[in-house]
Image (cartoon, rainbow, N blue to C red):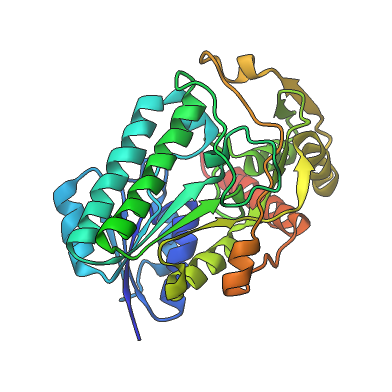
């Protein structure tokens, strides 16, 4: 049966891919996005689909959110300030959007009794070293004066709201913690490491590695993440639960830079930059490892990533080369 989905932040990287997937299977989608980090170009392929509607606006606009939630069956709340650089450089905007925006959207979902899914983040776990991290792992964060931990706290408040509305008021809610999603359409801005490294390599520029490069991450292709989100949206057993969603192929950032240089055939070299130089804002902190335990997700839905890190890099390098070629033929 066809459903109508409201996707906040649907012009963004993950939101646009989710919109594609929902429309492709015959659902209707309304996207609400203020285009602060999303791009209309991400929705070009669906812009003429009669089941698609785009609304430019903010999740902070209570009247607009209420009207759109009323018109839809399911609310997928992706709108958020994301990316380390954006969070560190604009902490007040990030904090307000991530807390007040979520509060407005979930209140509207409750008023109209709509199914609600909110994407959270692996930043929830902070500096917890007990990898792989499962959903019950402790939140280990630094002082609130550091912007990164303010972001982690804001997303924790989002989760608390979702759990409270489910337990106290019976709202069908699901929380999904995303771990380093990447792939086509991801902007190199806002501190996203793979598109940034790839574009530097393709352009023959140094790959700027923050810190000593020994910190490790796991990268999951956006198509796999969207597959996981759709599975959770379709499974009523996900209501009231929280799920990690991410791959487990761990790599250090320095090794990632080296692999991208090799794959792209670039003459570039990694360039180590201190955190203080990269993020002049006082008190930046990083974490050494970030590896998800996705057992809960796999046991409920059968989900497992299908694309490897090499697949991700091959796609991103091809995309960056096309961008470079297109820029070269543009008229001055």
Residue 276 lies left or right of residue 42; in this view the side is: right
Name the residue: 58% across, 44% down.
327
- The quarter holding residue 297 reads bottom right
Q: Is residue 56 visible?
A: no
Toward which corner of the image does residue 42 lie, by quadrant?
bottom left
Residue 316 higher or lower than 253, as above or below: below
- Report the label total: 0
Q: Which sits in the foreground, 42 or 218?
A: 218
Asked if one can make out residue 179 in the rendered structure from this viewpoint, the answer is: yes
Q: Nearer the viewer, residue 309 or 264?
A: 309
Give x and y (percent) for residue 59: 27, 47
Residue shown at 28% from the left, 64% from the top: 170
Q: Position of residue 137 (x, y in %)?
A: 59, 45
Q: Residue 285: which quarter of the image?
A: top right
| Quadrant showing the N terminus | bottom left
Q: Position of residue 156 (x, y in %)?
A: 43, 41
**112 left or right, relative to 128:** left
Query: Is residue 145 shown above or below 83?
Result: above
Determine whether 319 is above or below 141 in the image: below
Q: Which residue is painted at 46% across and 68% down in the image?
A: 238
Outermost residue toward the bottom in this view: 1
Q: Horizontally, is 167 left or right of 273 in the view?
A: left
Where is 246 relative to 284, above or below? Answer: below
Which residue is at a point 52% across and 13% down the rendered structure image?
A: 282
Q: Nearer the viewer, residue 100 or 293?
A: 293
Where is residue 18 drawn, in percent x and y?
Answer: 46, 64
């Amino acid at each position: 049966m066809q459903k109508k989905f409201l996707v906040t932040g649907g012009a963004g990287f993950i939101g646009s891919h989710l919109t594609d997937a929902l429309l492709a299977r015959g659902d209707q989608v309304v996207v609400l996005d203020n285009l602060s980090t999303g791009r209309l170009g991400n929705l070009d392929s669906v812009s003429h689909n009669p089941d698609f509607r785009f609304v430019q606006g903010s999740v902070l606009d209570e009247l607009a959110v209420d009207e759109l939630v009323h018109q839809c069956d399911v609310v997928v709340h992706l709108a958020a300030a994301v990316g380390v650089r954006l969070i560190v450089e604009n902490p007040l905007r990030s904090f307000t959007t991530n807390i007040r925006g979520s509060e407005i959207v979930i209140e509207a979902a409750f008023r109209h009794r709509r199914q609600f899914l909110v994407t959270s983040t692996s930043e929830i776990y902070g500096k917890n070293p007990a990898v792989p991290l499962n959903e019950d792992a402790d939140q280990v964060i630094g002082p609130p004066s550091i912007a990164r931990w303010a972001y982690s706290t804001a997303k924790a408040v989002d989760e608390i709201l979702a759990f409270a509305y489910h337990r106290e008021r019976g709202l069908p809610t699901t929380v999904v913690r995303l771990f380093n999603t990447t792939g086509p359409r991801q902007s190199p801005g806002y501190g996203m490491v793979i598109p940034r490294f790839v574009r530097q390599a393709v352009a023959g520029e140094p790959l700027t590695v923050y810190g000593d490069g020994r910190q490790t991450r796991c990268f999951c292709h956006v198509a796999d993440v969207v597959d996981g989100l759709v599975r959770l949206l379709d499974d009523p057993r996900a209501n009231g639960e929280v799920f990690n969603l991410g791959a487990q192929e761990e790599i250090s950032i320095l090794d990632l830079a080296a692999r991208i240089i090799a794959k792209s055939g670039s003459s570039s070299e990694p360039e180590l930059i201190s955190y203080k130089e990269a993020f002049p804002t006082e008190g930046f902190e990083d974490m050494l490892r970030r590896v998800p335990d996705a057992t809960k997700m796999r046991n409920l839905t059968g989900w497992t990533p299908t694309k490897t890190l090499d697949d991700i890099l091959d796609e991103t390098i091809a995309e960056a080369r096309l961008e470079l070629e297109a820029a070269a033929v543009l008229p001055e």
